[in-house]
Amino acid sequence: MTDSSSIDVAAARKLVATTPGTRLIDVRTPGEFAAAHIPGSRSVPLDLLRAKSGLTVDHSDPVVLVCRSGARAEEARGLLATAGIDRLVVLEGGIEAWERTGAPVKRGAGKWAMERQVRLTAGSLVLTGILGSLVAPKMKWLAGAIGAGLTYSALSNTCAMARVLSMLPYNRTPEQDGPALLEALTSSAQR
């Protein structure tokens, strides 16, 4: 553990092994979760947490937040800190770090990670803008707008394109908006 708000893979695995009530909460999109997740983790997408203000938490179990690399989990930590969770940490490096250490991962359907979806979408829009500018010169501004958006995204550590893509049916499951997903985080009853 490097500080009180984050935990490395070795410490997270030890916490799960020694503290049975530990909750691994994956805040990536349902599509990303379905593709690969830590065994025993539960999906509570960041978009759902953003939409549900005023959560109440009825447990004192430790909660380890997981995403692809740590950025979305850190945002979730900020949102959930106000819900009364005292033992809330982010997995440093996310599921990528988990996999690099050889820790077990449950694999499912081959859906793409959000970052890969953003790269494909942004790259396609830039390419469209450049090629389209051969016919309609003003299309070059599409490429410029995407470049400006990516620059802002890097500087602010946010991604509007990822938020939009997370709303697509491919990245959602029918039960995403139901209370069952939040129950993994908020209820006192264990699985």
Image (cartoon, rainbow, N blue to C red):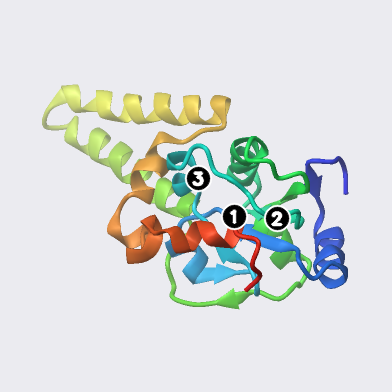
The residues tagged by marks 3 and 1 sit, at their Cα atoms, a distance apart of: 11 Å
The residue where tag 2 is placed is 59
Q: How crowded is mark 3: few (under 14 residues within 10 Å), some or many (20 or more)?
A: some
Image quadrant containing the C terminus: bottom right
Amino acid at circle 2: His
Q: Do the residues labelled 1 and 2 touch (CB within 8 Å)?
A: yes
Going 49% across and 70% down the picture, which residue do you hit?
Answer: 35
List x then y, in percent, for residue 98: 72, 63
Residue indicated by mark 1: 186
Label 1's element?
helix
Lower sequence index among marks 3 and 2:
3
In the rendered view, would you say 26 is above or below 191? Answer: above
Q: Which residue is drawn at 49% across and 37% down?
A: 53
Residue neighbourhood size for the residue with mark 2, other residues' Cα within 10 Å, grouped as few (<14), some (14–19), many (≥20): some
Q: Residue 67: where, in percent of width, then height?
A: 60, 53
Residue type, label 1: Thr
- Pointer 3: what residue? 49
Check disc 3 and give the amino acid type. Answer: Leu
Residue 159, relative to residue 156: is it above or below? below
Q: Residues within 10 Å of mark 1 (few under 14, many from 20)?
A: some
Comparing 122 with 165, the one in front is 165
Identify the residue at image location x=82%, y=54%: 8
| Labels 3 and 1: the sequence-earlier one | 3
Labelled pair 3, 1 in contact (Cβ < 8 Å): no
Asked whether disc 3 touches disc 2, contact meaning CB atoms under 8 Å apart, the reply is no
Q: Describe the element under mark 2 as helix, strand or loop.
A: loop
Q: Which residue occupies 63% across, 49% down?
A: 57
Give the CA distance from mark 1 to mark 2: 7 Å
